[in-house]
């Protein structure tokens, strides 16, 4: 409602504000029309001695894990490539705190393609399909 | 025309008891307590500013701020905290503690109105600042708290009522808020069902399979699930029928109990088999508050005519 008005228009601001206050700003089409594949973010961590490790983002509870899955879905749905990169950069930075010795981290963002029932019975399992990769390098401090 | 207007008013303002409000208050109180406890480990990590947590809350707040300047957010509270000389982390823990306290006060019904307003506001701040990490449960908790905050509290089951003994309640005001909650749920289920109808997966059952094996909802192993594959199409169509039929069958007194049980079972299933405990519990609370009271009427056994004759005889004797 009011979406044809400019973003700064007071009527649009009021309507958007009311929708958020009442919790009615989003639709109720969960898992519709179909259940999409889930997303995954993998960190490829490079060290100065040539060692490479792989890690996943981590949270402390199942409840936070559900929320993190939502975040990955939102990253996938983001049409703005710059915003998507910024979000992945933030997640990479958070992971970097756990690996302070790393000199480079490659963030690999992709989808977990789920098998159908029939293909699962034939022995297929979920597979990872890369969508984007981002490389972040630690800046050298200048004295 | 006059009759039509009367009918509409009668529908929107039915005389109601406050049973539904008691269910909503206690249910939302429990929900908020569970929300706080479930995020105890990650609270700071999820709501920290740029460079100090999982993802910056400043990013979500910037996007939100562009939409509307009136949407509550954590940085408002942090700004007040800074003015008082408190650090960011202290303010975040204070928000967590106050939310937990709000949930407990709602459960017992002490300072109900203040607790409902404060809990709605603090929960909204947390949800909007962590907007990149929210899903359906947060929307429905906001909806529930919004109705609770506006409804005529306190209810008779609350401590407030027992301690302060307020004046009698406005049954029509109780009625309109329950009616709005009922209409809201009907709309939510119908639109959800309608959008599911557009996907082939719910008709052939593949959406059930995919929902159950999709990380992080993969509570059950696919090896176990595949043994039940013949049930998936029936379950998929069952979900469509429950959601699409909700606004039609939940209103009729004849079918209300059956539909309510079906919806509750669906949400129990979502909670148990997909690990979405908080989503399941908020939907159960909202459904029980909206359509629970009055669904089973316990009436004292009426005396049969033969009993009355017998008693009359006994008296005359």
Image (cartoon, grey):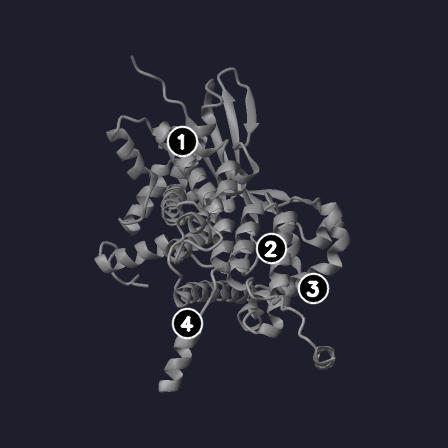
- Choose the circle earlier in sequence order: 1 or 2: 1
Residue ID for mark 4 = B12
Tell me what residue is drawn at x 66 percent, y 44 percent: B219
Q: Is there a contact, CB below 8 Å, between mark 2 and mark 4?
A: no
- Choose the circle earlier in sequence order: 4 or 3: 4
Residue mark closest to the camera, 2 vs 3: 2
Residue ID for mark 1 = B93
Horizontally, residue B1 falls left or right of residue A46, namely left
Tell me what residue is drawn at x 46 percent, y 66 percent: B16
- Choose the circle earlier in sequence order: 4 or 1: 4
Q: Which mark is residue B267?
A: 2
Q: Where is residue A59 drawn, in percent x and y?
A: 52, 33
Q: Which mark is residue B234?
A: 3
User: What distance separates the C-alpha of mark 1 from that of mark 3?
Assistant: 46 Å
Answer with the quarter of the image where residue B166 lies.
bottom left
Chain for disc number 3 = B
Please rate how many residues cluster around mark 4, counting C-alpha atoms within 10 Å: few if below 14, some from 14 to 19, many from 20.
some
* Identity of the residue furthest to the front in this view: B317
User: What distance separates the C-alpha of mark 1 from that of mark 2?
Assistant: 31 Å
- The foreground one among B53 and A134 is B53
Answer with the quarter of the image where residue B241 lies.
bottom right
């Amino acid at each position: 409602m009011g979406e044809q008005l400019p973003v700064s228009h007071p009527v649009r601001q009021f309507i958007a504000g009311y929708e958020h206050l009442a919790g009615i700003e989003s639709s109720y089409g969960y898992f519709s029309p179909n259940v999409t594949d889930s997303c995954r973010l993998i960190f490829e961590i490079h060290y100065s001695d040539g060692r490479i490790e792989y890690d996943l983002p981590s949270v402390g509870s199942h409840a936070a894990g559900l929320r993190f899955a939502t975040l990955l879905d939102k990253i996938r749905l983001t049409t703005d490539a710059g915003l998507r990169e910024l979000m992945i950069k933030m997640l990479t930075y958070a992971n970097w705190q756990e690996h302070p010795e790393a000199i480079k981290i490659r963030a690999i963002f992709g989808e977990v393609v789920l098998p159908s029932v029939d293909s699962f019975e034939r022995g297929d399992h979920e597979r990872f399909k890369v969508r984007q990769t981002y490389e972040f390098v630690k800046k050298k401090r200048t004295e | 025309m006059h009759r039509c207007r009367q009918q509409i008013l009668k529908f929107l303002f039915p005389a109601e008891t406050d049973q539904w409000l008691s269910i909503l208050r206690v249910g939302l109180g429990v929900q908020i307590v569970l929300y706080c406890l479930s995020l105890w480990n990650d609270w700071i990590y999820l709501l920290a500013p740029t460079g100090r947590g999982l993802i910056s809350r400043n990013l979500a707040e910037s996007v939100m701020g562009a939409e509307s300047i009136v949407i509550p957010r954590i940085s408002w509270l942090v700004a007040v905290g800074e003015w008082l000389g408190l650090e960011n982390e202290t303010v975040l823990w204070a928000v967590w503690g106050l939310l937990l306290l709000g949930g407990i006060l709602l459960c017992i019904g002490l300072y109900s109105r203040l607790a409902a307003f404060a809990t709605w506001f603090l929960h909204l701040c947390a949800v909007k600042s962590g907007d990149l990490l929210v899903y359906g449960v947060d929307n429905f908790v906001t909806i529930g708290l919004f109705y609770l905050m506006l409804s005529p509290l306190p209810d008779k089951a609350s401590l407030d009522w027992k301690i302060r003994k307020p004046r009698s309640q406005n049954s029509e005001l109780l009625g309109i808020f329950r009616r709005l909650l009922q209409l809201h749920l009907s709309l939510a289920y119908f639109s959800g069902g309608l959008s599911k109808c557009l996907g082939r997966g719910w008709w052939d059952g593949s959406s059930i399979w995919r929902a159950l094996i999709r990380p992080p909802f993969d509570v059950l192993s696919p090896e176990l699930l595949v043994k039940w594959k013949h049930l998936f199409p029936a379950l998929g169509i069952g979900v469509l029928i429950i959601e699409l039929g909700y606004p039609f069958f939940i209103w009729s007194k004849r079918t209300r109990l059956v539909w309510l049980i079906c919806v509750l079972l669906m949400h129990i299933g979502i909670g148990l088999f997909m690990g979405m405990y908080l989503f399941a519990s908020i939907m159960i609370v909202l459904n029980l508050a909206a359509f629970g009271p009055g669904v089973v009427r316990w009436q004292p056994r009426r005396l049969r005519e033969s009993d009355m004759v017998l008693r009359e005889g006994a008296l005359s004797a």
